Amino acid sequence: MATQKNSLQKYKKRRDFSQTPEPKKSSKKQPSKKPIFVIQEHAASHLHYDFRIQIGSVLKSWAVPKGITSQLGVKHLAVETEDHPLDYAQFEGVIPEGNYGAGTVMVWDIGTFTNIKTKDGKLVPLKECFKRGTIEIELDGKKLHGGYALIHTKLGDGRQWLLLKMKDKYANRRIPNQTKSALTGRTMKQIGTKGVGKEPKRQGKTSKKKVGTNKSSKKESDSTIKIGGHLVKLTNQDKVLYPKDGITKGNLIAYYKEVAPYMLPHMKNRAVTMHRFPDGIDHEGFYQKDASDFFPSWIKLIKIPKEGGSTAYVVCNNAETLVYLANLACITPHLWLSHITKLHYPDRMIFDFDPGKKS
Ligand code: MN
């Protein structure tokens, strides 16, 4: 088990604190006598609510896509995420574009809680509750009150829990001020608008850096590289595509660039179906067959007829194309089993040792 100290490593690894206004660490070990909790509404690529409770000196965290309810009998999926520093409970603002979790964050509810999980008449310590996968706490927030339970499920990758309201006098009560911050009374929109001005200025075409300023250059998440005589524009390289391991789009691009000499012979002259994951592997990706109009002209395309028209597939014959696809978060390029010159004569066969449930 991770110790308290290094349990924030993942949190720190995912964030560039010269770019994001999120707190780097906690200023206090124990902000109040009672442990604290916070629920943050987070308009990232997908709107969700982050439910965080203090266990030890960190905030254990879950992402709850459907939010928190007071309705009895309603179970909401809560996906365990990385530990956050205690100071995060006070964080409200905008995580700038290109950063992990980019989007507006509102403190939807905040307060303290009491551990109420007992076994054989004795209180079970919180750390033990977490380890065993059954947490029962009584919230004393600005909006939420009473018992809530978090139950670990064995589903998926082991990060899935269920969050539910426990039976007490607060059950089924209407939750007040749902659209406003429990900390500042602002709406998401108000936080978003105010936050924009705080975002670090991006180096645009028109804002060339002033000569003579001493400030070290901010890490750019956009850049242009030259490969095979072509310029490839790389965007949002800090975007985390593998949240569990903190692998960014920049890492993916670097990987594909490195393996290109070994990979390209297997891709040569075969149509590619792009399997893209713009929000990372934890979110549903999509398949793209037809090349977009904005693809650079140096990318080789093959028009393959289909009923009522044709599809212009990418043919990835060089490293610059592979890197360009990686920049589109095309984590998995699927290759046709036939060569573009002999479309109806496949010369490869796939044995899928890990078929999907529907196969
Ligand atoms: Mn979040």
Image: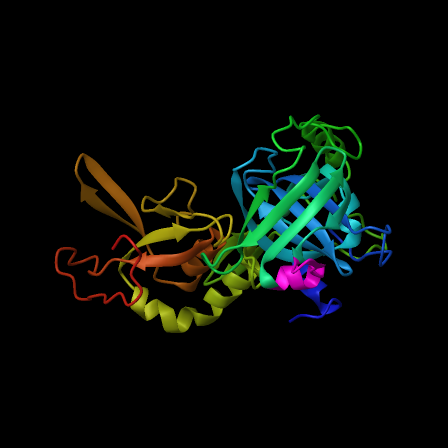
The answer to which image quadrant residue 39 occupies is: top right
Can see residue 106? no
Taking 277 as reference, is 187 left or right?
Answer: right
Q: Is residue 179 above or below residue 128?
A: above
**Percent position (x, y) of residue 354?**
31, 65
Is residue 272 shown above or below 112? below
Q: Residue at x 56, y 35 (%)?
A: 72
Q: Residue at x 70, y 33 (%)?
A: 192
Q: Is residue 48 left or right of residue 127?
A: left
In the rendered image, is residue 143 in sight? Answer: yes
Most foreground residue, 2 or 268: 2
Query: Residue 133: percent from the left, percent from the top?
Result: 58, 59
Q: Quadrant of residue 103?
A: top right
**Where in the figure is residue 85, as x and y percent of width and height?**
76, 56
Image quadrant where one finds the N terminus: bottom right
Q: How many marks?
A: 0
Q: Which residues are magenta?
A: 119-131
Q: Could you tell me which quadrant the C terminus lies in? A: bottom left
Using the image as rendered, state which of residue 91 and residue 161 is in the foreground.
Answer: 161
Assess whether residue 120 is covered by the magenta stretch: yes
